[in-house]
Amino acid sequence: MSEKVQKALELFNSGFNCSQAVMGTFCRQFGMDEQLSMKLTCGFAGGLRCGEVCGAVAGAVMIIGLRYGQYIADDKASKVKCYEITSQFMEECVKRKGTVLCREILGYDVRDTVTRAKFPGRQTEVCPKIIETVVLLLEEMGF
């Protein structure tokens, strides 16, 4: 297991969510404060709390943005590069996991409290696997 996967899983197991675990693992290498990154990514878990794009995947896309993202209005090349890398990342996630949607990864929508109650512990089983996949993919991509 890589050091980054290990750190991400430690963050998750210590009480941070999937998005925070991914961002917290990579933020410092891009000069981002860990406390700020944890605050920024807190609301992305559970697919933005509505079962959409997995928080771990969203965290990884933020990392891609930290490396390749456009920050000067007329720097269209950075925008294109970021979009290309993001698309490659997303396509590979779908190949490896079958989906990037939280509700499909978990098998239920996080908003559905009745169904969620039928799967106690599901997040502690499933989320570490997607976190590991996302972190390994970022590493393979040179992050």
Image (cartoon, rainbow, N blue to C red):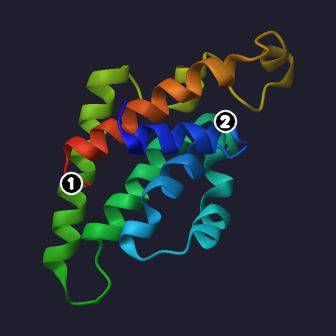
The residue under the point 25% across, 35% down is 91
In the rendered image of this protein, does residue 45 appear above or below residue 84?
above
Left or right of residue 53, residue 142 in this image: left
The residue under the point 81% across, 9% down is 118
Q: Nearer the viewer, residue 90 or 35?
A: 35
Classify mark 1: residues with Cα within 10 Å, few (<14), some (14-19) or many (20+). Answer: some
In the rendered image of this protein, does residue 121 appear above or below residue 89?
above
In the rendered image of this protein, does residue 79 appear above or below residue 141?
below
Q: Amino acid at mark 1?
A: Ile
Where's the N terminus, which quadrant?
Answer: top left
Q: Residue furthest left?
A: 77
Q: Position of residue 138 (x, y in %)?
A: 30, 46
Quadrant of residue 88 in the image?
A: top left
Which residue position is annotated with label 1? 85
Which residue position is annotated with label 2? 13
The residue under the point 28% across, 89% down is 72
From this viewpoint, is residue 124 visible? yes
Q: Nearer the viewer, residue 20 or 45?
A: 20
Give the spatial CA distance, label 2 vs label 1.
29 Å
Q: Earlier in the sequence, mark 2 or mark 1?
A: 2
From this viewpoint, is residue 100 visible? no
